[in-house]
Image: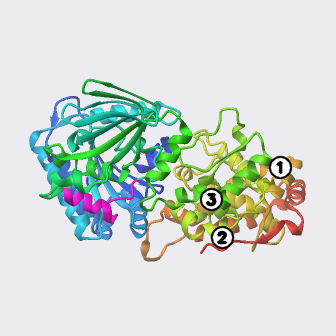
């Protein structure tokens, strides 16, 4: 997960009373809490002390109230976010980041901790894993971060301890191999998920029943039967070459086996010691993108995938795609995760299904506070949000507004947004989009109704007010959060901007800020003329309003 400068600064909790927690990152898309401890030294080795610090943070997280009472201010605020994430059943991933190597005793401790966390996850309602990010992994992640597009993995797999067979099926090069788990766990891209770009399903986490059984087999006395218990892993690549016992893979991606490889990775220290424990791999040379997509979909049909991925072939989605691309021939509607628009399409007319869902719930349901959660959008609220007859003009209207909004959510910060807001680029911009809709709703005395996105865009464009409305609503969002941060909370609770953004209270505060701005505008110097222009812009026909789509 890429973090910009502001997000990184917000995540850091290091300092006095950090309670062995250097940083906390909450990934809402993956529903994972990353607890980070770093030990950066030049060369040499580190002993088990850093691991014990990680273990200490794990023990303390079991009692958030006590930990918050003794932590520093930065950690206290992040723990408020952690508490909210726990309510939503997020997993915990402890990462020890170090530029050194572990001593033998520290390596044994890591294996022990992995086993302990596996037992806790199995027997208690606390799903957590621990992972080592060493110098090699840091270097690889840095290289991936430098790439502007989806990273391509080229990997040479050592088959010297594997049992394998190359064949050709349907004019396709295939290699079937029984690979030791200790070799499989070395494949690049497991930890950061880049290996699974073409997989319709990402990791379902440790609480998933299947993953728990995989872990039990690896850690138990039946690990040698893993090959027989497991259905195997499907990997595709653009090109592969078998030279002796070296399999060279170019553009490697696992399309079925994400759950297994992540679970194997979470038991990495145990896995590295296992002999005669294999997993079946099927490697296919598939340069054709459409064929690769079909393989990914069909190999994952045996069990549930994420709601967003299941919806990619829904008739309503396909109908919206057809209507949108008919209306805007220069545009493209992306329905599948990882899909790229053709190079000849206009980037201003490219819309992603996932983004559209977030726009719809922010605008038409007036609930930007849940725009960050794909699961709710594409599962619980899909039937409400996605209509077969939704106009392509409205899709592009939402797209246009969001493009203009995001021009201001940059490090340059042209609107002077509160720095804390900039740390929440994963979800706060949807509040900005909501504020745009509410300027039109409140301006027409219809705060309980939702305006047509295309009508608002066209009217603002005709009056030369697009930039002004985006600037005004950004400032109203700023004001709303400032007012909320100064509000006295019950029981001396600590104000958390992230939790505020995810609450309905944020919507009330934004509405109040917009109403106050409109009321005060005529009294400002030169404000009467600005008021008239704003009033003329936001006034659209009554037929352009409809009741909001319920998503409570």
The residue at the point 83 percent across, 49 percent down is 465
* Mark 1 in CB contact with mark 3 (< 8 angstroms): no
Binning the other alpha carbons within 10 Å of mark 2 as few (below 14), some (14 to 19) or many (20 upward) gives: some
Q: Position of residue 472 (x, y in %)?
A: 74, 54
Label 1, label 3: how far apart the Cα atoms are = 26 Å
Residue 481 circle label? none
Q: Earlier in the sequence, mark 1 or mark 2?
A: 2
* Residue bounds of the magenta highlight: 203-217
The residue to which callout 3 is attached is 357
Q: Is residue 445 magenta?
A: no
Residue sitting nearer the eye, 109 or 239:
239
Please tell me whether mark 3 sits on a helix, a strand or a loop.
helix
Binning the other alpha carbons within 10 Å of mark 1 as few (below 14), some (14 to 19) or many (20 upward) gives: some
Quadrant where the C terminus is found in the figure: bottom right
The residue at the point 62 percent across, 59 percent down is 357
Quadrant where the N terminus is found in the figure: top left
Q: Earlier in the sequence, mark 3 or mark 2?
A: 3
The quarter of the displayed image where residue 354 is located: bottom right
The residue to which callout 2 is attached is 384
- Would you say 264 lies left or right of 492 here? left
* Mark 1 in CB contact with mark 2 (< 8 angstroms): no
Q: Residue furthest top?
A: 243
């Amino acid at each position: 997960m890429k973090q910009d400068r502001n997000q990184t600064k917000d995540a850091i909790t290091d300092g006095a009373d950090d309670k062995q927690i250097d940083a906390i990152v909450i990934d809402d898309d993956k529903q994972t809490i990353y607890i980070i401890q770093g030990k950066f030294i030049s060369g040499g080795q580190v002993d088990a002390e850093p691991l014990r610090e990680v273990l200490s943070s794990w023990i303390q997280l079991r009692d958030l109230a006590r930990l918050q009472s003794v932590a520093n201010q930065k950690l206290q605020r992040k723990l408020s976010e952690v508490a909210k994430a726990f309510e939503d059943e997020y997993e915990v991933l402890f990462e020890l980041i170090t530029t050194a190597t572990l001593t033998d005793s520290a390596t044994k401790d890591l294996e022990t901790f992995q086993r302990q966390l596996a037992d806790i996850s199995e027997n208690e309602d606390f799903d957590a894993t621990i992972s080592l990010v060493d110098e090699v992994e840091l270097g690889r992640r840095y290289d991936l971060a430098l790439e502007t597009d989806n990273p391509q993995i080229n990997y040479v797999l050592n088959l010297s301890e594997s049992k394998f067979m190359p064949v050709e099926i349907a004019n396709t090069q295939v290699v079937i191999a029984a690979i030791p788990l200790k070799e499989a766990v070395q494949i690049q891209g497991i930890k950061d998920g880049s290996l699974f770009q073409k997989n319709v399903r990402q990791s379902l986490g440790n609480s998933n029943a299947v993953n728990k059984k995989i872990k039990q087999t690896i850690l138990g006395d039946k690990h040698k039967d893993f090959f027989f218990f497991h259905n195997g892993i499907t990997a595709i690549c653009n090109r592969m070459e078998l030279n002796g016992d070296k399999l060279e893979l170019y553009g490697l991606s696992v399309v079925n086996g994400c759950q297994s490889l992540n679970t194997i990775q979470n038991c990495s220290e145990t896995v590295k010691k296992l002999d005669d424990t294999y997993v079946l791999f099927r490697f296919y040379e598939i340069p054709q993108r459409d064929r690769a997509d079909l393989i990914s979909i069909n190999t994952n049909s045996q069990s549930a995938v994420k709601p967003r991925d299941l919806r990619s072939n829904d008739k309503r989605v396909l109908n919206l795609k057809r209507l949108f691309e008919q209306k805007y021939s220069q545009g493209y509607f992306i329905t599948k995760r990882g899909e790229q628009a053709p190079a000849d399409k206009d980037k201003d007319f490219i819309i992603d299904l996932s983004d559209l869902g977030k726009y719809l719930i922010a605008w038409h349901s007036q609930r930007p506070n849940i725009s960050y959660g794909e699961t709710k959008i594409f599962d619980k609220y899909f039937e409400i949000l996605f209509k077969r007859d939704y106009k392509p003009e409205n899709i592009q209207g939402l797209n246009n507004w969001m493009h203009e909004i995001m021009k201001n959510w940059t490090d340059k910060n042209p609107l002077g947004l509160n720095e804390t807001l900039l740390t929440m680029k994963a979800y706060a911009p949807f509040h900005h989009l909501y504020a745009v809709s509410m300027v039109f709703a409140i301006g027409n005395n219809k705060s309980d109704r939702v305006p047509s996105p295309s009508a608002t865009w066209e009217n603002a464009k005709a009056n030369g007010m697009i930039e002004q409305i985006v600037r005004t609503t950004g400032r109203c969002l700023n004001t709303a959060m400032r007012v909320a941060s100064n509000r006295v909370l019950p029981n001396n609770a600590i104000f958390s901007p992230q939790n505020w953004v995810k609450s309905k209270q944020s919507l009330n505060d934004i509405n109040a800020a917009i109403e106050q701005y409109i009321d005060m505008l005529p009294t400002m110097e030169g404000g009467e003329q600005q008021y008239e222009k704003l009033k003329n812009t936001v006034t659209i026909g009554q037929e352009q309003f409809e009741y909001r789509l319920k998503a409570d």
